[in-house]
Image (cartoon, helix red, strand yellow):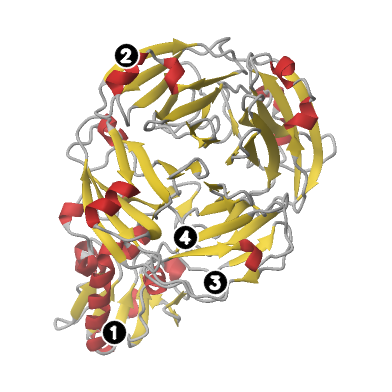
Amino acid sequence: MALKIETFSNKTGGFSAFKAIGHPLVVKKAVALITQLAESGPIAIFDPQGLANAFAEVHDCSRLQINGCYVQDVEMIGTKIFGLEAQSITKLSPSMADTIFVVTFDAARVIENISHILGSNAKIFSLDDMRLEDTMLTNPRRYLDPLNFATNFAFFRDTETNHTRLVSANYWAGYGAKDAKIWCRLFSSTGDVLADWEHCLDDKVSTIVIDSVEIRHRFKLNDFSGQLFLHVVGAAGHDVVKYALDTYGNDETALSCTHDANAWPADLYGGLPAPNLGEKVVLWVQNSHPCPITKGAIGLNRMGDKDIVWLDKEIPAFASFPLDISSLLPDVKWPAQIEINAGKHFVRPRYEITTAQGRSRISHPNVERSDLKTDAKIPGLNTHLGKGYLLPAPILPCKRFKTTILPTPMATNQENLPVAAVAYDHQGNEIARHTFGCLKRNHDEYLDADLWLGSDLEHCLKAGYGHVELVYDFSDGGEADGWLHGLFRYEDRHSGHAAETSFGAHIFNSILTYKDEPQSYAGPPPGLSTRLFLRAGRKPQDALCHLIYPASTPWHKFSRTELILHNQSGQIIATENINIPCGGSLHFRYSESFDRASIAKAGDDSYVLIRDTTCRLFGYHGLTDRENSFSLDHMFGF
């Protein structure tokens, strides 16, 4: 059963209220509040902001004796709150209840406004009774300020053979944050608390590294496979906690990189690949709330099919469960895709693929939107916006890597995908085009770049690498909404190690705008600049990066891109300038981009800020390990 909570709006962004109600540090306070309410006899619920049902969704309120629910929003009168029909607050009288539960934070002003309605002896409780301590708040004066709940979860595991490392930067310092810190809580697979600690940040844009090996040693822990909760205190500029998560092993058989978890639980996720021959695909279901996930609340179905198979298992609060998708869908195989019915129980999850050769990799599906409608204007956008929406992804150096392309439905309204793939060499020259046609929602068509581009890939790509763009193609009909996605899989021809990444389309590098495109993370569209984070890793690993200069319309002939090397403390060590042709790409390694002296001076856990004020670049990053394994996912900026 899906949780009836509001977590995110594509118009207004994420909601902080559900984070405040379900924060790990308020669970005990919530239990104490409910106990007091239960012991007070019959109570009246006053729900001025529509938070009561969300509170009841994540906390057990079955002991409460409720004799009425009241609202001040006229449009909420008659709706169901705690299962009762909501009434106007003007109908509340002192004779109806001795105890009032005002379901809001910063409640003093709200309570003052209804003081003439309440009896002089009424006991009044509010959500302020379960507030975080002020030391955990960036802005104590406004409790639901999104900056107070700059939180996220991360898959976190450490065993004798598998480890995780979370890497980011204190980008809040770049917006003026001072004395910031990250409060961390590590949960076990059963949801038990293994450790709490604070990770203090300086006032520079320095590297943040949280390594499972170091945490396990510090707290003397046994093996764990759980999740790490992060709460940034003192944030500025961004309430989104972004990171790269590297998973690595004692040898080259385990290495992968994934983007942050996307802090808002969703109803649906798409782009989960079914297992190929000899593979096992595990979906890590990690409960993001202080209430259990009940039996039958999580389900899987083949994308495009309506028959959902539900998981007959309860998952405790903040616990993690490795769901072998073949246990629910034994007959669904690659290249079929799986739809995850998540019911807002967890943030964007991880999935882990283990091959018959014992190699493993981790990646993430994406949020599947349920609010989109077909946009009849998109087929005509090329008049003004050239290519319009496009999704760029690498064609990695073809001598070493094989590239596979799989379009993925990522919205509930997408019954068809009118899509084509266009290949470009590193200079931006189109070298091939493949029309998928109008794919069905349950399609199983993918594109093997070897078969597509032919045997002489190196000659075809000149530099040995390039990129592909998924674009709309209406030659066979079809509909579009701008939410075009794809999964891109890469396989090492020598070792068999693989990596995959998935993302969605945008309009790039056009002075003309359409809706919220070209997307900008710091203001209104168009977004025409770049600030990407490339972590350098730790020896013997070497960072790799594939930068793409996509352009929906002709833009500057070349990028003017700076690679700015910082040490772990955020000090600039060296700068290199690069120029990428419009519509082209650049594949490079960290070890080859700076001289040895600069790399030695930067040391471990350094990072490169990729900066360009003339155009928006799109990037992919990863690590290589002894030339036998590698990782790849899309980059994040700030």
Q: Mark 1 or mark 4, which has the lower sequence index?
A: 1
Q: Mark 4 or mark 2, which has the lower sequence index?
A: 4
| Residue ID for mark 2 | 597
Asked whether disc 3 touches disc 1, contact meaning CB atoms under 8 Å apart, the reply is no
Instruction: Provide residue 150's location: percent of width, then percent of height.
Output: 32, 48
Rounded to the nearest angstrom, the CA distance separating label 1 from label 4 is: 32 Å
| Residue ID for mark 4 | 346
Q: Does the image show residue 103?
A: yes
Asked whether disc 4 touches disc 3, contact meaning CB atoms under 8 Å apart, the reply is no
Determine the residue positioned at 38% across, 12% down. 595
| Residue ID for mark 3 | 297
Rounded to the nearest angstrom, the CA distance separating label 2 from label 1 is: 70 Å
Kind of residue indicated by mark 4:
Phe
Q: Mark 3 or mark 2, which has the lower sequence index?
A: 3
Q: Nearer the viewer, mark 3 or mark 1?
A: 3
Q: Is residue 360 positioned above or below 68 on the image? A: above
Q: Is residue 476 positioned above or below 119 on the image? A: above
Kind of residue indicated by mark 1:
Ile
Quadrant for residue 417, please give it: top right
Asked whether disc 1 touches disc 4, contact meaning CB atoms under 8 Å apart, the reply is no
Determine the residue positioned at 75% across, 37% down. 447
Rounded to the nearest angstrom, the CA distance separating label 3 from label 1 is: 30 Å
Mark 1 secondary-structure assignment: strand
Q: In the visual, does 586 lie left or right of 637?
A: right
| Residue ID for mark 1 | 43
Asked whether disc 2 touches disc 1, contact meaning CB atoms under 8 Å apart, the reply is no
Rounded to the nearest angstrom, the CA distance separating label 3 from label 2 is: 55 Å
Asked whether disc 3 touches disc 2, contact meaning CB atoms under 8 Å apart, the reply is no
